[in-house]
Amino acid sequence: MNLLLKLLGLIRFSHTLFALPFAILGGAMALKLNWYENPEYCPRMVEWVGILLCMVFARSAAMGFNRWADNELDAQNPRTANRHLPAGLLTVRSVLFFVAVCSVGFIVSTLLFLPNRIPFFSSVPVLFFLFCYSYAKRWTIAAHFWLGGALMLAPLAAWIVIRPVLLPIPLPPVLLALAVLFWTAGFDLIYATQDMEFDKKTGLFSVPGKYGNKAAFRLSAICHIISVLCLAAIPYVYELFGLIFELGIAAAALILAVEHRIAVPQPDKPIDLPRVNVAFFQMNVFVSIGLLVIGLFDLLYTA
């Protein structure tokens, strides 16, 4: 049990709350469309169990791999030197075993969607894409957007599970996925401001390390504006949403504005790490869970 708790701490299991609500919302949108087109449609509970398991296993495998890949960097960075691997709380062997178990769990979980074979055949390429993120910051400044791309797969995958057609993917889940991409890149840019000096010193590619924190905060704000615009467009191309969801989008925009107000330092003031962490986790959990709750309520309300 102690080992399991350490592994959950290693991958910050609570951060699953970032992507899981959008996966559920994407699946719920597809489900409502199925009902709209065919009132006799009967959903399968096993598909929702599979979505949950795939999300947990995929993110756990990716985070565990990331901690292993960044072990040496984390040991050099004062902010991350107390993480489980550099601090010696976990061994490399145990972390890699955990990654392997979660990877197998993710692939096996896709079998719950049969006869829909798309998730199974996509599982290994998806894991490869997730694992590659861990090395992106070593060679491209687009690493923040790579992370966004990893999380944007959640609503797209859930939509394909419920409506098993790979191409063409309709506009509603694409807009939701783009909203997740820019939302994630935006808060990752804020989070990365903590390591501006370390990134410069080690030559890692990040917007703060290359262009400074001021540029990172500005780009983050642009990303969040684009994210809100993508969300705002969904009710116009997916008519099963109504006024309730639009009010939820307005609330999400307000929360993101508060996030920037909390995180962005005053002129000539240093980065306040506790405030950045509050902006990174608490505000973004409000956004993801809030949009899920309001979105589901709107879908039921407009039934």
Image: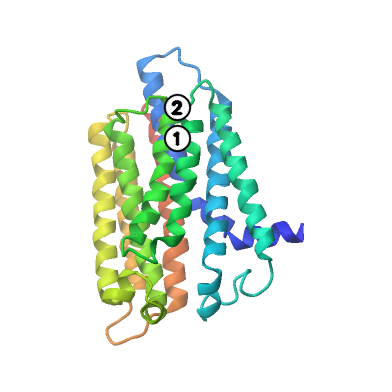
Which quadrant is the C terminus positioned in?
top left
Residue 230: x %, y % from top left: 26, 45
Residue position marked by numbered label 1 in the rendering? 158
Q: Residue furthest right?
A: 1
Which quadrant is the N terminus positioned in?
bottom right
Residue 145: x %, y % from top left: 33, 56
Residue 67: x %, y % from top left: 55, 63
Give the secondary structure at mark 1. helix
Residue position marked by numbered label 2 in the rendering? 162
Kindly identify the residue that appears in the image at 37 percent across and 72 percent down.
263
Q: Residue furthest bottom?
A: 268
> Horizontal placement of 89 versus 40: left or right?
right
Kindly identify the residue that appears in the image at 60 percent across and 76 percent down.
82
Number of residues whose C-alpha sits closer than 10 Å to that of mark 1, classed few (under 14), some (14–19) or many (20 or more): many
> Horizontal placement of 254 versus 100: left or right?
left
Could you say which is closer to the camera, residue 70 or residue 19? 70
Q: What amino acid is at disc 1?
A: Ala
Using the image, determine if residue 16 lies above or below residue 256. Answer: above
Using the image, determine if residue 282 lies above or below residue 86. Answer: above
> Horizontal placement of 266 versus 160: left or right?
left
Give the secondary structure at mark 2. helix
Q: Quadrant of residue 224?
A: bottom left
Q: Quadrant of residue 83?
A: bottom right
Q: Quadrant of residue 273?
A: bottom left
Q: What amino acid is at disc 2?
A: Ile
Q: Are marks 2 and 1 in contact (CB under 8 Å)?
A: yes
Could you say which is closer to the camera, residue 231 or residue 118? 118
How far is disc 2 from disc 1 in space, using C-alphas?
Answer: 6 Å
Kindly identify the residue that appears in the image at 48 percent across and 32 percent down.
121
Could you say which is closer to the camera, residue 141 or residue 26? 141
Regarding residue 303, the answer to whether it shows in the image is no
